[in-house]
Image: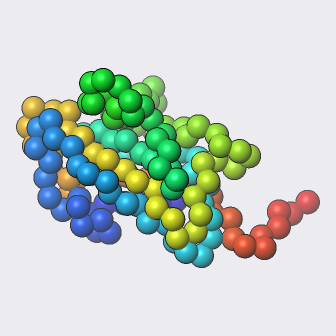
Amino acid sequence: MYSFDSSNLPVFQGSLAAGAQTGRIPLKLDKDADFFLRAIDSQGTVAFRLEDTDGNPLSDCDNVINSTNFELQPEYSASNGAGFAALESGAGGVFGPGGGNYVVYLFNPTVGPINLATCVINLIGVKRYPGEVCAA
């Protein structure tokens, strides 16, 4: 699992005005192994849009009303914040090469500013190391 918050992502140390969105925020993966994204979890009131390491959106991106291109976890999880399941992209999940970047964009759907220090984005999945063989 990769966890991104104000301790390791400087952009999460500011605030986001009502109705505003951020630009492209890279979520850097470790270089030691490929990563297969299986689920996404977020905390805070900010909405987000995630792209894989090739720039392919993992949520809507072409809606006429831009704010509908963002996911707000409490609205989409029947389990009260347990996380989103990622769409499968092969046997292991959505592939991300070692050293690659997933990309997130944040949007504030509220009427007031959001303190981004309260936000956390977790990429849940598995790392596959070079030469790793599964036990029979």
Q: Residue at x 57, y 58 (%)?
A: 96
Q: Is residue 25 left or right of residue 76?
A: left
Split into 4 quadrants, where in the image is the C terminus? bottom right
How many numbered dots are placed on residues in this image? 0
Q: Is residue 22 left or right of residue 83?
A: left
Percent position (x, y) of residue 57? Answer: 46, 41
Q: Is residue 117 visible?
A: yes
Percent position (x, y) of residue 34? Answer: 62, 65
Q: Which residue is nearer to you in this view: 47 or 66?
A: 66
Percent position (x, y) of residue 106? Answer: 28, 45
Q: Is residue 40 visible?
A: no
Q: Is residue 58 left or right of residue 104?
A: right
User: Residue 127 lies in what quarter of the image?
Assistant: bottom right
Q: Is residue 112 left or right of residue 117?
A: left
Q: Residue at x 15, y 35 (%)?
A: 19
Q: How is the image coloured?
A: rainbow
Q: Looking at this rendering, what residue extends furthest in the right direction?
A: 136
Q: Which residue is nearer to you in this view: 114 or 11?
A: 11
Relative height, residue 112 to residue 35 (above, below): above
Q: Residue at x 33, y 42 (%)?
A: 48
Percent position (x, y) of residue 78? Answer: 45, 26
Q: Residue at x 10, y 32 (%)?
A: 111
Relative height, residue 73 to residue 44 (above, below): above
